[in-house]
Each structure stands twice: as C-alpha cells, then as structure tokens.
Amino acid sequence: MENMEKPVETYYKKLESYYDSNGRLIQYPSKRPMRIIALIKITEQIDVNRKYTEKEINEIIKFNIAFDDIELIRREMYQYKLIGRLRDGSEYWAETDWRNAYAEYIREG
C-alpha cells in the first residue's frame, strides 16, 4: 500500500482537464470528490479572518470559473460548508474548520 497513489491524487490529475490555461474551471465536475477539490481551490482564496459581501464572494468565484453559473458554485460552497453566510445573504465568510473537515482532499505542498 505504501507505493500506491492516494485516491485524492488521482482526482487531482483528472481535474486538470477541467481547467483552462488561466487556471479557471471550465466545467463543474460531476464526481463529488472532484467537486470538493474544485471548490477547495476557490475557498483557499477566501481570508478566514474577514467577512465578505455576496458581491465580493461572487467576484472571487467569477475569477476562478470560465462559465456563467456563479450562483451554483456559491450554493455548493455553502452546502459543503466551505463558506458560511447570514440568512439574508448580506455577509459571507470562510468556515473556520473547513480545512479539518476536508483534510483528506487537501494536497500537501
């Protein structure tokens, strides 16, 4: 088992084809592990020590995707508990424990 590649590495490799030359996601993956990794890559750009407006979160997402469904990505980030928000959507933030919750999906180095 020592020489075997971790399954997460396989997903990272497969996911490479989902990005354009600018590192923007061109298609939202259908497989859950690949979705989580794609969402983590966006979440890593959100400062855990600050609050964001919906517009600011949308800008971060927009910068990272090459398709038009910002709402889908934002909703998924919330559903996977990568980000939190106030009920009225006026404030967003990165959840403090998302790195622990998804440790198995985070690439070392």
Image (cartoon, grey):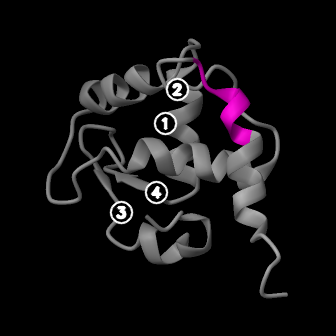
What span is in magenta? 15-20
Instruction: From the image, tell me which residue sits under label 2.
Output: 71
| Residue 26 image position (x, y, % from top left) | 64, 19
Q: 98 or 55: nearer the eye?
A: 98
Q: Is most of the magenta stretch helix, strand or loop?
A: helix
Residue 65 in view here: yes
For disc 3, the marked residue is 95
Task: State the residue position of label 1.
Answer: 74
**Amino acid carrying mark 1 in the image:** Arg
| In this picture, residue 13 sits left or right of residue 19 | right
The first of marks 1 and 4 along the sequence is 1
Q: Earlier in the sequence, mark 2 or mark 3?
A: 2
Q: Is residue 107 left or right of residue 36?
A: left
Would residue 26 appear left or right of 87 to someone viewing this image?
right
Tell me whether the residue at label 2 lies in contact with that at label 3, contact meaning CB atoms closer than 8 angstroms: no
* Closer to viewer: mark 2 or mark 4: 4
Q: Position of residue 8 (x, y in %)?
A: 71, 63
Q: Which residue is mark 4?
A: 82
Dot 4, how many residues are within 10 Å of its Cα: few (below 14), some (14-19), or many (20+)? many
Q: Is residue 28 visible?
A: no
Disc on the earlier residue, 2 or 4: 2
Q: Residue at x 59, y 13 (%)?
A: 67
Disc 1 on helix, strand or loop?
helix
Q: Are marks 1 and 4 in contact (CB under 8 Å)?
A: no
Most foreground residue, 51 or 89: 51
Instruction: Name the quarter where the N terminus is drawn.
Output: bottom right
Q: Are marks 4 and 3 in contact (CB under 8 Å)?
A: yes
Question: Distance between the Cα atoms at labels 2 and 4?
Answer: 15 Å
Q: Are marks 1 and 2 in contact (CB under 8 Å)?
A: yes
The secondary structure type at the circle numbered 3 is: loop
